[in-house]
Amino acid sequence: MSFFSGASTSTAVSAPAATEKDIEVADPPTDSISSLAFSPQADYLAVGSWDNNVRIYEVGASGQTQGKAMYGHQGPVLSVCWNKEGNKILSGGADNAGRLFDVTTGQSQQVAQHDAPIKSVRWIETPQGGILATGSWDKTLKYWDLRTPNPISTVQLPERCYTMDVQYPLLVVGTAERHIQIFNLTNPTTAFKSMVSPLKWQTRVVSCFPSANGFAVGSVEGRVAIQYVEDKDASNNFSFKCHRRDQSPTQKDQSLVYAVNDIAFHPVHGTFSTCDLSGSDGTINFWDKDARTRLKNRTSLAFEPAPGPVPATAFNRTGAIFAYAVSYDWSKGHSGMTPGHPNKIMLHACKDDEVKRKPPKR
C-alpha cells in the first residue's frame, strides 16, 4: 500500500446541492480510468486505471475527497469491486492477475490467475459465504474461495469475456461475438440460459437489474436492450437507441453514433444511467426502464461538461452520489491518445427528480 504523494490529500468544496456543480476528485489517476466502485458500507470509492494502480478515495458529507490508499498491478487495471463488508477491494487487470487489498491492514496480495487479461471481477455473496468471480479474455469464468489458492471451479465461455455483472442469484456474462451467458448461482458451473445479444453490434456492457430478474445490455452502436431472464416475462423485453447526435445543427440525421460504455442501476429507485464514448462531449442519461422513458440527460442535470469519453460510472450505496470518469477509452488505439486529454473523476449529487421514477399518468 502507498498513500497518495506520501500523505493523504484532500480538497474541500461547498456542498454539491448549494453549488449545483459537480465536484472533481483530487489527485486522479495519471492515465485513463477503467472502473469505478463504491463501498457497500461507506462512501469510499475505488478507482481502477490504465496506470496499473487502484486508488481508494474517501468522500465526505459535503463532497470533499481524500485520497486514502493505493496499490498496484503489473499492468493496466480493468475492473474493481468490493466485498459485502466493505473491508476488501478486488481487482483484475491486463497482468492476468486478480488482487485483493485489505483495507484494515493496508496489504495487497494476488488471489486469482488467468492465462489472459482479467476483464471483469465481481464479488458474490452466497448463503455459504463470499466468493470472487473473474471473467477473462482466455474465455473462462472462474470462481475463487479466497482461502484457497486454486479456483473452486472453471467455466468455459464461448468467447472472450467483455463484461460481467452479478445480482445474486443472477450472474450475466457478455462475450465477444455477442454471446450472453446467464447463470443461476445456485448452479454456478452451468449456464441457465445461453443467447445471442438482441443487439446487432458488439456488446460493451451488461448490468443486472436490482431485482435480479433481468439485465440491460449496451452495445457499441448506441443501443440498449432490456432483457428479462424468464420466458414468461419476454413481452417486457425491448431495446432503444441512445447516445446519437446530428452531424450538424442543420442536419437532423442522428448520424453520429457512440457506444454505450456503462450502465449503472440506482440502488433505491431501480432507474439506470447510461454513458457514451463520444470523442468530443461525453453524455450521461438517466432512464426508467419500466416506463420506457428518459428521465433526465446530462445537459439538463447541471453536470460539468465532459469533453471526452465517459468510460465508467457508479452510484454510492444510497444513490445520493453518482460518480463518473472522464478519460480516453482507448477505442481508437494509441493514436487517439492526444496530449492534454482530460483525465478526471467527477461526483454529482443526485436529486430525486433526476433518478426517481415518475408516477404514472392518470
Image (cartoon, helix red, strand yellow):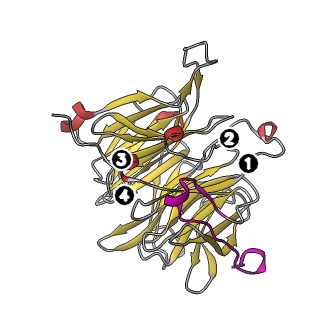
Q: Which residue is mark 4?
A: 267
At horizontal 68% and vertical 48% (from top left) the residue drawn is 327
Quadrant of the image containing the C terminus: top left
Count of marks, rendered view: 4
Q: Which residue is mark 2?
A: 308
Q: Nearer the viewer, residue 51 or 172?
A: 51
Residue 209 lies within the magenta run? no
Label 2 Cα neighbours within 10 Å, binned few <14 / some 14-19 / many ≥20: many
Label 3 Cα neighbours within 10 Å, binned few <14 / some 14-19 / many ≥20: many
Region of the chain picked out in magenta, as a range: 1-25
Per the rendering, the mark at residue 271 is: 3
Q: Nearer the viewer, residue 308 or 48?
A: 308
Residue type, mark 3 in image: Thr
Q: Please give left or right for residue 47 compared with residue 127 in the image.
A: right
Residue type, mark 4 in image: Pro
> SS for tag 1?
loop
